[in-house]
Amino acid sequence: MNAPASARASAFRVQLLVAMMVLVVAVAGLALLFAQHNVAETVRQDFERRFAGEIAAVREVQAIRHEAQAERCRVLARKPRIHAALEDDARDLLYPSARDELGDLLAPNPVAGDAADRQLFEARFYRFLDVTGAVIRPPDATLAGIMAPAEEQRLALRGQPRSVESGFFARTVANGTEVDEVIAMPVVSTETHEVIASLVLGFRQLPARMNDETAIRTGWWIDGHLLFTGYPEAMREAAEKVVAPLVPEAGQSTDGTVVRIGDDSFLSFCELLNPHSGYPPAYLVGLYPLADAQARQRALLWEFVGAGLLLVLGAYGIVRVLSARLSRPVAELAEDSEQERAQRKQAEHALGQTSAELQRSARFSADASHQLKTPVTVLRAGLEELLADNQLAPEIREELSTLVHQTFRLTNVIEDLLLLSRLDAGRLQLDLVPVNLTHLLDGLRDDLDALPDAKELLIESDLPPDLNILGERRYTSLILQNLLENARKYNLPGGRIRMAAREDEEWCVLTIGNTGRPIDPDAQVHIFERFHRGAAGENIPGHGLGLNLARELARLHGGDLVLRTSDQEWTEFEIRFRLAPHEIPRAAS
Amino acid sequence: MKAAGSRRVPGDLSALRLAPAFVLVALLSGVPRAIFGADIEGQVLLSPNRRMPVVNRRYEIVANEGVLSTSPPLAVVYVEGDWPAPEGPPRAEMAQKDMNFLPALLPVQVGTRVEFPNEDEQYHNIFSFSPAKRFDLGRYRKDEKPVPSVVFDRPGMVVLRCDIHEHMRAIILVLATPHFVVTEPDGRFHLGHVPPGRYVVKAWIDSRTTLQRTVEVSEGGTARVDFR
C-alpha cells in the first residue's frame, strides 16, 4: 500500500522539479538572451563609435594636412615675383624666382626620420603649368626638385585648375613605395584676374600609422593599386584583392563594409581624396581590425553562457529543495488518501456483506412470514371449527376463543413482519395520492372510541378541516393506527390523548400525545428499533414492531417520525407528511 | 617695347590745318637745335569717367583686364626723334611712400638714373622683371644710403613691383627723347623748347595704347596736337 503512494509522490516531485526547471531555464534563458543582446548591441555601438571616431580622426588629419599644404600653395601663388615672372613676360625668371620664394619649402634632401611636422610642410618638388596645363620645365631640375620625366608628365592637367586640385601619385623608392600628394593651385593674374598659370606642389605623404593592433590601418588606393606603406607585402596584396571591389565610382565614398583578409575581419572605409580634380581619383582606404571587437563579443558570449550555466545550476539546487518541500504535503496526502481508500474498501466490503445479510434476513423474514401465514390460518380454521361444536364445555370454549384471538395477533405480527421485510428489501413502492388526513384521523378516533376499554380515555383533536397530505391511504392509516394504538396502550386510566395538526410550509406536522409513564431517557434512542419494547410494557400487549414500522413507512412517505417529548406527564410523537398540492385544483377552479 | 605699338591710326590732321604757317619751316630736318625752340601743346582725350584731381603727383597704377594705366588716367606725351644722348646721366626719383610709388608713372630719358628712396617705415623690395630692365634692389629701409638707384639704359616700359607689398605697382617709361611730359588730369599738356622741325609726337595712354601724331614746329611758334 505504501510503495505506490511514495512512487507517485516521487513522480510528482520529479514533475514539479522538471516544470520548475523548465520555467526557470526559460525565464533565465530569455533574460540572459535579452541582456546579452543588449550588451552586444552596446558593444557594437561602442565599436562603431570608435570606428567613426577613428575615421573622423584620419579624415581630419588628412583634411588638416591638405588644408595646410593648400594654404602654403595659396600663399606662394600670390608671390609678386612669380606674378612678375608670368605677367611681365619673364618666364626665364620663373623658376629662379620660385627658388627664392620656395627655398624654405623645398626639402633639400628628404631624410628618413625627419620630424613629421617638418615633413608635413616640406615639398618634395614643385612645377608650374602653363595656361594649357602643360608642365613648364625648369631650366635646372635642382631648382624645383628632381623628378623623372614620366613622373613630371603626370602633373600635367587638361587646362587650368579652377580651384585647388589635388592628386596622389605613387613613387617607387629604394625601400618600397612612397606617395606624394600634389596640389595644383591656380595662379590668378592680379591684372587680368585670369588664371595665367598654376603652381603644382608635391608633398610626401607620411607613412600610414601602425602603432597598435586595434588602430585603424590606412593606405591609398591609387591607379588600381593599394599602397599600404609600412605593412608586409603579403598583407598588402591580400588587402588589395578585397579592397578592389569596394573602390567606388568617382565621387563616392563607402564605409562600414566588413572584409576578410586571411583569418581576420576588418571594417573598411574608402573615401575619394580628390573630388573635382583633374588628376586621377585617389582613395583613402582604412581598415579597422575587428579582431578586438570580435574577441570582446566572444568573451561576452562566453561570460553569458557561463553565467547562464551557473544560474541554471543554482536554480537546479533551489528548485530541488523547493520541489521536495512542496511535494511533502502532497506525499502525505497521497499516503492518507491511500489509507482512506483502504478503509473505504473495507467499509464497502463490510457494507456489501451487511447488505447481503440484510437481503438474506429480509428474504428470510418474508419466507418465514409466508411460511407462517398458512399454518396460522389453518390453525385458526381448526380452532373455529372446534368452537362451532355446541357440545363444548364453556371453559373449553373460553379457552378456544382465547386461542382464536391469539391467532389473530399472530397474523398481525406476521403481516407486520412481511411488510417490514418488503420495506427492508426496498420492494415497497408507494403510490402517493392526496389523502384527507382529517377524515382519516376522525375515522381512527371513532375506532378508538368504539373499543371496549376500561381506561376511559379523553381524546382531543385539533385538526384543520380537510387537511390533505401525499400518501398511500393504506400505509398512512397504518402509521397513524400504530401511533394511536400506542397512545392508548401506554396511557393512564382516565388519561388523555391529543391529536393536533398544522401546516408548516410544504409540510403537515401532526403531533400525537398522550398521558402516561415517561419513556426512560436511555431507552428513548432505542424505541424505534425493531422488537424494542418499553421497560414498563411487560403487561402491555405488543410485539415491538409498531414504532419501527411506523417510522419506516413515514420515511417512505418522504416524511419522518420522531419522539418530540416524553416526561412524567406527557409523551408526544411528531410525524411529518408532505402536504398535497391542493391549492392548484383550487386555484384552477 | 611691348606697349609701344599704336593701335590707332594717326589720321587726325586738324593740327596741320590749325598751324599751316609752320609746315615749311618744319620740313627742314637736321636744323641745329635752337636754344629756345618751339612749344607743342594740346590735349589727350582721357577717360572722363575716372577724372579726378591729382595732388602732389599722387596717383596709382591700376590693371584693368591686363592693361596697366594710371588712376586717375594720365598720359605721357613725348616727341620721337633722333635725339643725342644726354650729357651726364640725368637723374630722377621714384619714392615709396604710404605703400605706394610716388610718382607711380615716371617717364625718363634713356640713361637716366632713377633713385628709389624708401620713405615708409617698412621695408620695401623694388624689382622688375620687365624685358626693358630687370633689376632687384633687395630689401631696404628708410634712409638707406646711398639711395638705391638704377640706370635705365634701354627704352621701353618697365613695370616695377615690390616683393613685400604685392599691390604696389609703378611704371617707368624709358624714352629715347628728352622731350616728354605727363599730362594734366584733363589731358592738357605743354612741351616747351622743342627745336623746330617735323616730328612724330606720341601719347602713351596705357600699357597697350600709344597714339601718335606728326607735327611740324617752327622757331618761336606753338604747335598744337590733340589726341582724340
Image (tube, coloured by chain):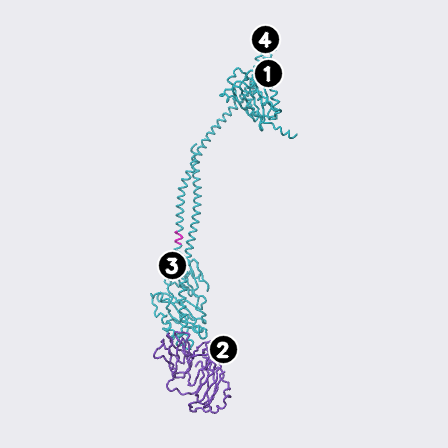
Q: Amino acid at mark 3?
A: Ala
User: Marks 1 and 3: which is nearer the front?
Assistant: 1
Magenta segment, which residues? A294-299
What residue is shown with label 2?
A: B49
User: Marks 2 and 3: which is nearer the front?
Assistant: 2
Secondary structure beneath label 1: loop
Mark 4 or 1, nearer chain start? 4
Question: Is A297 a magenta residue?
Answer: yes
Mark 1 or 3, nearer chain start? 3
Quadrant into which the N terminus of chain B falls: bottom left
The picture places residue A325, in percent across and down from the top left corner, at: 41, 38
Q: Amino acid at mark 1?
A: Leu
Q: Colour of chain A?
A: cyan
Q: Nearer the viewer, residue A419 or A224?
A: A419
> Does the CB distance between marks 2 and 4 fall below 8 Å?
no
Numbered label tally: 4
The chain under label 2 reads: B
